[in-house]
Amino acid sequence: MISKSQTEHTQGYRGSSKILEDCLQADPTAKMEETSSKEFTQTIHFEGMPGSNCTQATEFSLAVFTKDPATQVTLFLLFLLTYLVTILGNLGMITLIRASPLLHSPMYYFLSNLAFVNLCTSTIITPRMLVGVLLGTKGMSYAECMAQVFTIDLFLITECFLLAAMAYDRYVAVCHPLLYPLVMSPERCSQLVAGSYLLGLANSMGQTLGMSSLSFCSSSSINLFFCDISLLISLSTSDTTLSLVILRTASCLLGVPTMLVVLVSYVAIISTILSISSAQGKHKAFSTCASHLTTVSTFYGALIFMYLVPRSDSSRGADKWAAVLYTVVTPMLNPLIYSLRNQEIDGACGLQLKDLTCVRMAAEGNGTPSAHFVLLGFSELGNVQVALFVVFLVMYVITVLGNVGLLLLIRLLAQLHTPMYFFLSSLSLLDLCYSSCIAPRLLRDLLAEDKAISQAACLAQFYFYVAFATTECYLLAAMAYDRYVAICQPLLYPLSMSPGICVLLVAGSCLVGVTNATLHTGLALRLSFCGPNAIDHFYCEAPPLFALSCTDPAPNELAMFLMAGFHLAATILAILVSYAAILAAVLGARSAAGKRKALSTCGSHLAAVLLFYGSLLSMYSRRSSRSSWQRDKVASVFYTMVTPMLNPFIYSLRNQEVKAGLWRLLGSKHSAAK
């Protein structure tokens, strides 16, 4: 048996925390000797055991964030959105820097490599984490874990050196501007980047080789969502001296110097900026460093919190969120940090879009491109717009209060923690987002004289409403399937509608919606707009938007017609088949009370389905003409404003469980107040 002192020492060991402490303390030699002595004692005690029956672990168990299905869906959607933004942002940054001659400078050369490293880091960790959050699986094989350790160490150290090189670049630019072209020549920049990758590769090879000799015979549970090398070393039941030496040496020789380079560079930069006499000169000098300083603070702040700040075992759950910050959030934020307030990137992006549009339109023989659209909305109604504003404002307020209230009610009442109400809470959240995508803009345009909307904002609105509409179609189909299983196969209901399957159905609906929206928005980007820019609708709807294009919109219209037909047909067919089976089961029931009870669980969903699909079919089951757009606007009001408002009432007014739960909740609050 392994001794108790050895087990406590092994599991409580935080390798990376001691790494930086050893490097920063005044007498690291004595500390190393003390630690090595303890490890030597541990090794002798373990290896001196005769006939150990230790079995090498072939799989590691990663930590999960939560076991609550509703929270799992929320986290999955949040991490999925973060990963999509990370991919689009970093790929867009790399493409823009490569394509624009204005950005062919050392600073943006480093930035393009940083974007590549961020993209790789996020791709190594996030997809595996998404699978774990969605399916609840947390196992990872030994080979996968070692591969993840190798790649994470590679890109982590590479990013440290890239940030240091970027700090040095800013130091030369601010403190020695006349020498900048000579010091930061293309050859020097290439050497700095290549050196960063080589040092990262050497570190990852050394760390992985040191890990390859370790045995994992006791615990194989890692309290993190990826394979962190310090936690793996703490789990090992063999001699960890070599691995710890390699880890500490690499941290002291690679991690700490990069931090010192950044600190020394910014001390010199701040000193130079303070010596500048004009406020404009100070602002200009500091603006070139603000983005990099924000990135450095986010990246190193999370690393220091995770590996340097001492904590007790009970507080180590915060490590997961610190790791999320530097492995998931920081790669997403970096492109935004370097672009939102960067005039050069904004200018280069504008020039690229303008050049592409002008080239395409010159080839087609068209005129000047439109920079924005005008949403006509209900402007033809004149003074009635004020009355419409009041009506739509009341509807939107009711929508927000109703859906938020239903969400809170389902969340607070334990008796509503069932698959049916899990789907209903997802539908309420979706309706809330769907209505908020359209209603605020509509309310603003009803009172404002200027109804202009930029092309970027128009396409963003187009993307989100397509995503939400498609998701709701599949979510309503999933709810119909839930009712089918509950009525036709009640004994199999707990198994068929397990929390994992419910999460999978909701996440799959969201994934189909995002995919469909990405397809149509990507096709919309090929269109050019050079003539009339007035959209005869109250939001950026596809048919009137396509009608303004100078480019042939036939591919977009065909794709919209086919995809809308497919999604509508697939989900409607699933609903019809489910309700045909439900109706057959209900008619086969002998008692009238049983029939009424079975139908009552379906009445609310059936009403919501008829209201939603009725308006959608009038819009997308045919090709719209200009003469039918007025009718389309009325139909759009139903599925963008009326349906999200009515759904909470449809599912609560005649639902005994919801009403009973609400009165019980209000009664408990009243009793507590007394």
Image (spheres, rainbow, N blue to C red):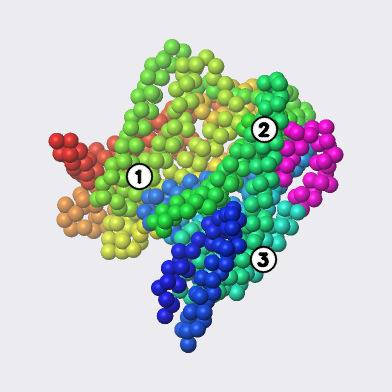
Task: Report if residue 353 is visible in the image.
Answer: no
Question: On the rendered structure, is 547 left or right of 174?
Answer: left
State the separation of the CA atoms marked 2 and 1. Answer: 52 Å
Residue 23, magenta (yes or no): no
Q: Position of residue 668 (x, y in %)?
A: 18, 41
Q: Nearer the viewer, mark 2 or mark 1?
A: 2
Which residues lie in the magenta part?
165-194
Query: Answer yes or no: do the residues labelled 2 and 1 have beta carbons within 8 Å?
Result: no
> Which residue is pictured at 29% across the width and 57% down the height?
486
- Can you identify the residue that label 2 sits on? 270
Query: Answer yes or no: do the residues labelled 2 and 3 have beta carbons within 8 Å?
Result: no
Q: Which label number is shown at residue 206?
A: 3
Question: On the rendered structure, is 111 left or right of 248?
Answer: right
Q: Quadrant of the C terminus?
A: top left
* Marks 3 and 1, the one that precedes in the sequence: 3
* In the foreground, 107 or 124: 107
> Which residue is pictured at 39% across the width and 56% down the height?
314
Residue 274 quadrant = top right
Residue 166, magenta (yes or no): yes
